[in-house]
Image (spheres, rainbow, N blue to C red):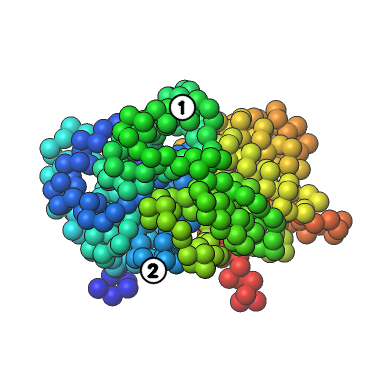
Amino acid sequence: MSSAQDHARLEAIEKALAARWPETDIEPSLERISVLVDMLGSPQLSYPTIHIAGTNGKTTTSRMIDALLSAMGLRTGRFTSPHLESVLERVAINGESISAADFIYAYNDIAPYLDLMDEKFETPLSFFEVITALAFVAFAEFPVDIGIIECGLGGEWDASNVVEAAVSVVTPIGFDHMNYLGSTLTEIARTKAGIIKVGSSVVLARQEPEAAVELLKRAQEVGAPVAREGMEFTLSSRALAVGGQLLSITIGENEYDEIFLPLHGKHQAANAATALAAVSAFFGGQELDLEAVRIGFASVTSPGRCEVVFREPTIILDAAHNPHGAKALAETLENEFTFDEIIGIFAAFGDKDVEGILHELEPIINTLIVTQSSSPRAMPVSTLLQLAESIFGADRVKSSENIQEAITLAITDTRRPSHEESVGIVITGSVVTVGEARAILKKLSSQGRDQ
């Protein structure tokens, strides 16, 4: 196919996927995905996997594990969700998003089975189940040496949980998706602990006590060895550096020092420790090559996670969509940037703890512009404005009808003649918000280069 034909075919596939059950509507069961991968010849069992669950930091930790393993010479396949701008981002091979041609090839492989599955079950296959199966097939066909598989939602009945992981990783657990996972950390952790299975090693990021209890209980039930942050591995030291931070990480008796991580935030340093512990567990706890570790971490990117995407003014994108993520963002802005003033652009989903997010952001943001993404889940601007004014005060809140207008308003505000201070713009609230903003800012940057 030509590139134009690829583009047309990809658009058709995306429309077909979008017509399926959305990934935010869950019918908790592994029955459908189990039958589908069985029909496909169980591609997810043709390579070893590292499986990642948790509430915050899953995608970045997955990207770090990918970078480390690539630096050690392995061919990697990485499956993450959701995407920022293109569905191709969800399936990465050797650290790069899958090509349109390869995505189409993998979809064509599974397409004959989709209608059959939809007829077989009362509940049709969801978008997420199909894209998960597609990733499994793409990795088997490449083929990869290892798959890095991120859970979409929960763990026990997440479509990704048909893998038999060599290493199961759980990043920090917080409150999110309570309508499916439960209203307490104990209930949420119990569901996420479902990825821990006989034959796997377990790596646990630092957890709240009630979550840790459930995770350790599950590990004990299946006889899985556990590495815990602060016990079997630890972030030994962390210092700010130009463009990121310098880390030392201890795993067992092995010390890995002078690691440059080109990401901001203490939470990213903790993610790095978890990622390195996962790679160490995959190799049976043996000492890793320090130079490969340094090269791997130095190459890490994490789009949409405290990502500086524009200069003059500085614009930062962060996909924080729950209070835990918003708190980490606020701490990073306060401790690692030197803005005199911060303008926030905020658009969130109506089914999230928007009030909790705003309370975490209020101390660090001087002026907040509330707006709305294109998602049908987006909280209306009028509702968000009222909520934001109750937390920030009416004098600190503005509104725009869409993200494009909000960005224009914020940039214009930073360029007032009276502004002699350092002003930063932070765009946050959801992955969709950040994805749309990223596309807008790319066009602005391109226009600036052309002038």
Kindly identify which residue carries mark 2.
Answer: 73
Lower position in the chain sequence, tag 1 or tag 2: 2
Q: Is residue 407 visible?
A: no
Say which amino acid is labelled 2.
Answer: Gly
Instruction: Give the residue drawn at x 61%, y 68%.
Output: 445
**Residue 240 percent location from the top left of the image:** 70, 56
Q: Going by the picture, which residue comes out furthest to the front?
A: 253
User: Looking at the image, which is closer to me, 84 or 416?
Assistant: 84
Say which quadrant the N terminus sits in. Answer: bottom left
Say which quadrant the C terminus sits in. Answer: bottom right
**Residue 391 percent location from the top left of the image:** 70, 30
The image shows residue 337, relative to residue 243, as above or below, that is: above
Kindly identify which residue carries mark 1.
Answer: 213
Instruction: Give the residue drawn at x 20%, y 38%.
Output: 32
**Residue 423 percent location from the top left of the image:** 77, 54
Instruction: Give the residue drawn at x 70%, y 28%.
Output: 390
| SS assignment at label 1 | helix
Q: Hey, which quadrant is residue 258 in on the image?
A: bottom right
Q: Is 348 displayed left or right of 101 in the figure?
A: right
Instruction: Give the residue drawn at x 46%, y 58%.
Output: 287
Q: Is 2 displayed left or right of 113 in the figure?
A: right
Say which amino acid is labelled 1.
Answer: Val
Mark 1 residue crowding within 10 angstroms, few (<14) / some (14–19) / many (20+): some
The image shows residue 360, relative to residue 451, as above or below, that is: above
User: Looking at the image, which is closer to me, 412 or 437?
Assistant: 437
Q: Is 7 displayed left or right of 215 in the figure?
A: left
